[in-house]
Amino acid sequence: MSAVSKWQRFEEELLALQEQHLYRKIKVIESPQSSHIRYRNRDMLMLASNSYLDLCDEERIKAYAVKALMEYGTGSGGSRLTTGTTVYHTQLEEALARFKERESAMVFNTGFAANSGVIPCLCREGDVIYSDELNHASIIDGCRQSRAETVIYRHNDMADLERKILERQGRQGLIVSDGVFSMDGDIVNLPGLVNLADTYGLLSMIDEAHATGVIGATGRGCEEYFHMEGRIDILMGTLSKALGAEGGYICGSRTLTEYLKNNARSYIFSTSLSPVIMAAAKRALELIEEETWRVRRLQENIRWFCRQLQEHDVDASSDTAIIPIRIGDEEKAMRVSEKLMELGFFIPAIRYPTVRKGEAMLRAALMASHTKEELSAAARAIAESIRCYEG
Ligand SMILES: *Cc1c(COP(=O)(O)O)cnc(C)c1O
């Protein structure tokens, strides 16, 4: 019998993470997800949530979800293809297809399940997947699960992408990219990407997790932002961010969704979401369409906050609700974040492996409901906290 514990190597790895300031701890929130939260028994300004339109705790959405709860109960009882499709599921899918101006839409249980299920379903042995180096982990996992060759191109670099396509000309495949990149908050070069896809007969797939409800005049995402309606072949997004609910979706042609319904394993072999959450997502979508001021307010807040940071000599600019504030050193980023927490601002540090080693940052995320005063105070606190740990 070996005296070495079965857990020794895991314990050693955890210790190493602690030493490198890369150990992650769960933060427990004691309130609804909104611009003000309770954390460690005190009120804080939330500047980290993906709930960009602040719809997680909206009264009309909650009332509609409660109606669905009382009518249909809690669980769906089966996968979408067996017993797990209710009218709340299909009504949401119809609303999504309308919102994104597509023939058809389908809901997956998470955005992660959509990406990791759809990519291996559409790309097979002999195909090529061209994937941006900063794509989300769920896209990376989808590529890994596929038998296709995955080719990583430099971040948003269309010349590099075209070079790589030309080296493999004539092969079928897919170009896949985040629409808004989840850590840096920058936007895909959609005209360049779609042009290459159409020129070389490749499918285009854009992940709109951080674009829907955020960019474009009415929050419809990347196509609206670039005035390129209808040009993306496979539109993917989540219900879990600006829409304040849960789930992922795919919008596109009827051929696309029918094919996926018959083949995508994460769709077929997983119990579908509760009708309660489908109802919440549908009502949220309606509110975004009816009350266009939400998206406008968010976009105003983004401009205001970046300007405030710049006035305090903090380098920050973004066209999206994600505003990265670069720190570099992991330990310094942790210290600055902790200092901000003490001051009542919830802004976590983002470290390796989410971003590269030595490129730690604060990732501020804005909401439509933040006030100008709150954002000014946050910008001042960020500048002061960074200065505290300078040199
Ligand atoms: C959050 C996110 C996902 C995953 O969506 P979930 O609904 O949270 O599973 C996929 N892609 C990107 C770019 C994301 O930011």
Image (tube, rainbow, N blue to C red):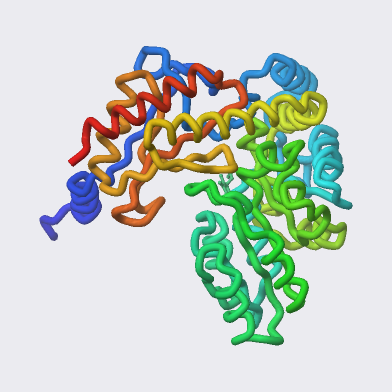
| Residue for point 73% across, 28% down | 284
Residue drawn at 74 percent across, 16 percent down: 60
Residue 165 drawn at (x, y percent): 63, 80
Indicate whether 6 appears above or below 160: above
Q: Which residue is drawn at 59% across and 49% down?
A: 180
Q: Is 75 placed above or below 110 here?
A: above
Q: Nearer the viewer, residue 123 or 196?
A: 196
Quarter where residue 21 is shown: top left
Left or right for 303, reference 387: right
Q: Is residue 5 left or right of residue 186?
A: left
Where residue 314 sits: x, y (%)?
Answer: 38, 37
Residue 352 percent coordinates (x, y): 34, 51
Q: Does 211 appear above or below 338?
A: below
| Of residues 146 and 223, the one drawn nearer to the viewer in this rendering | 223
Query: Based on the displayed image, in which of its 4 quarters is residue 325 positioned?
Result: top left
Q: Which image quarter is the C terminus in?
A: top left
Q: Residue at x 71, y 45 (%)?
A: 221
Front-most of residues 6 and 49 = 49
Residue 319 drawn above or below residue 291: below
Q: Relative to the observer, which residue lies in front, 85 or 375?
A: 375
- The residue at the far left in this view is 3
Number of marks? 0
Where residue 238 appears, as percent x and y from the top left, is 65, 43
Q: Is residue 207 left or right of residue 387?
A: right
Q: In which quarter of the image is the N terminus?
A: bottom left
